[in-house]
Image (cartoon, rainbow, N blue to C red):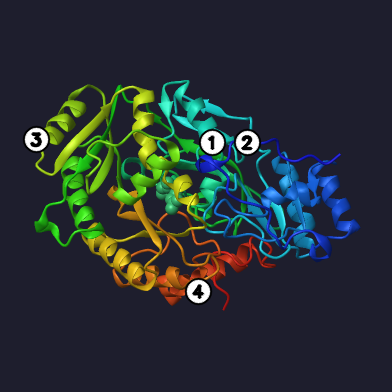
Amino acid sequence: MASAEPSRKAGYGRHVSEPPAALGGGGRPRLGPRLEGALRAAVGEGHLLTDPDLTASYERDWTGRYGGPAAAVVRPGTTDEVAAVLRVLSAESVAVVPQGGNTGLVGGGVPRAGEVVLSLRRLRGDVHVDPEDRLLEAGAGTTLAEAQQAAREVGLEVGLDLAARDAATLGGMVATNAGGVRVVRHGPLRRRLAGLEAVLADGTVVDRRGGLLKDNVGYDLPGLFAGSEGTLAVVTRVLLRLEPLPASRVAAFVALRAPEALGTPGAGRATATALQVGREILRLGGIEVLEVVYPPGVRLVCEHAGLPAPPDPGADAWLLVEATGDDEVTTARLGALLDAHPLVSATAVALDAPGRAALFAYRERHTEAIARLGVAHKLDVAVPLSRLARLAAEVVDAVAARWPDAATVLFGHLGDGNLHVNVVGPPPDDDEVDALVLGIVLAHGGSVSAEHGVGVARLPFVSRARHPGDLAAMRAVKRALDPRGVLNPGVLIPAG
Ligand code: 2HG
Ligand code: ZN
């Protein structure tokens, strides 16, 4: 009997997706009995799903904006099974969409038109931590939360964190080079990656799990596969570098009042203020988290999640800061800076884990709170810090001028120059607002995808965001590793 994946806590707190209306009935693509038989033989009866009730949750992404019918969902449980599935499918040139926890936000991990979904979630339950060499190895289907827990048990930490930790898988995080709230200190996933095992389109297994800091024998394949969004290989095992758990950790939620000198009222002035204070905080050293949120988002989060009013409810922006160290010195220095700062109107501080989680909630619950308003246009953008305030002001003004009734919610990773621009109002299938915002970002020398990836959402902008020579090299790599173009076609690399 076929069985669906046992239910798992969805990322970002709440799942908004519904089965796409186009699914079911006569329009559903099928592989045919011969191929279905070969896939069943590869993964075992029960792990090839074709019943629409069972495939539905794999066919639409968390935003509800992207997805389409799958010909089938295949759920291998080992690397050998992944290789067997890919051999079967590539021999017949059947397109495959690799999928982890399905917490992506750009449509890169869901089918579009009858591809086979290759779900890697069963590649889990096999987490090894090496405390001496500070390495963690786990199957690609292991969630970030499971990896964090395993590291903590031996006094280490992963150095990566994001709101979807309970559902996001390590394989998916490699595929998207995931970022999150600790990039300012530890970098994105690629910097945490010590090695991996992956399967190429033709079933060849690539095994680079040396875990050495220095190893210059040839191309950096793990680095290449990180951020390749399932277009070059399917990640099956992941090796991460771990960090020592700090002896002291303090979180602060810091209310800011923006002075007139920093520009006209609104998102620009608030961002300039946040940057001014944020830069001083970064100079203290030991800063692991430096995030910014604004009144529209904080209001929404408080309403949706029932959180108490934030410090200084009338503030123009808030910073979420976490400082770590071997002793209390960092905490004391942060406290002294915030207490004396003329732009800081109030601060809430927490030293213990529940207290810190309560402060992080004001930031982490933005995604689910925004989803309550409707399907959001999610623009995940980065610009040099020197441009961030202008970008915030221009984006908010441009969207308001064109769609006066739209809700624009900004928040993000201040220390990384990475803002999440969420616009709810313009119809989900209308890309005009995406083009408007990303045009402003490109004019400021920014990135149209800071951390969520290209997927299908940013595909129309890749040619404007990359030099023609870069694109030619990317296409050549793709052709070399996946000559039949079966791995996640229609994602990341524009046709041409
Ligand atoms: C975050 O930083 C995620 O919380 C999601 O990257 C961002 O919902 C978003 O726009
Ligand atoms: Zn983010």
Which label was assigned to residue 8?
2
Which image quarter: residue 87? bottom right
Spot the residue most to the right: 33
Of 16 and 456, nearer the camera is: 16
Select label 4 or label 1 by which is in front.
1
**Residue 117, x across and y down, in percent:** 70, 53
Amino acid, disc 1: Asp
Asked if 106 appears above or below 436 in the picture, the reply is above
Front residue (pair 142, 133): 142
Residue beneath disc 4? 472
Q: Residues within 10 Å of mark 2 (few under 14, many from 20)?
A: few
Secondary structure state at the residue bearing disc 2: loop
Q: Identify the residue under disc 3.
A: 340
In front of the other: label 2 or label 4? 2
Considering every residue shown, the one lying at the far bottom of the view is 496
Q: In the image, residue 84 lies at what x, y percent? A: 77, 49
Q: Residue at x 52, y 39 (%)?
A: 13
User: Callout 3, which amino acid?
Assistant: Ala
Looking at the rendered image, the disc whose residue lies closer to the viewer, 1 or 3, is: 3
Spatial distance from mark 2 to mark 4, Cα to Cα?
40 Å
Vertical placement of residue 457 versus 7, above or below: below
Residue under the image location 68 percent in, 58 percent down: 20
How packed is label 3: few (under 14 Cα within 10 Å), some, or many (20 or more)?
Answer: few
Q: Secondary structure at mark 1?
A: loop
**3D distance between C-alphas at marks 4 and 1:** 37 Å
The numbered disc on residue 166 is 1
In terms of secondary structure, where does tag 4 sit? helix
Distance of mark 1 from mark 3, alpha carbons? 38 Å
Q: Based on the displayed image, in which of its 4 quarters is residue 66 positioned?
A: bottom right
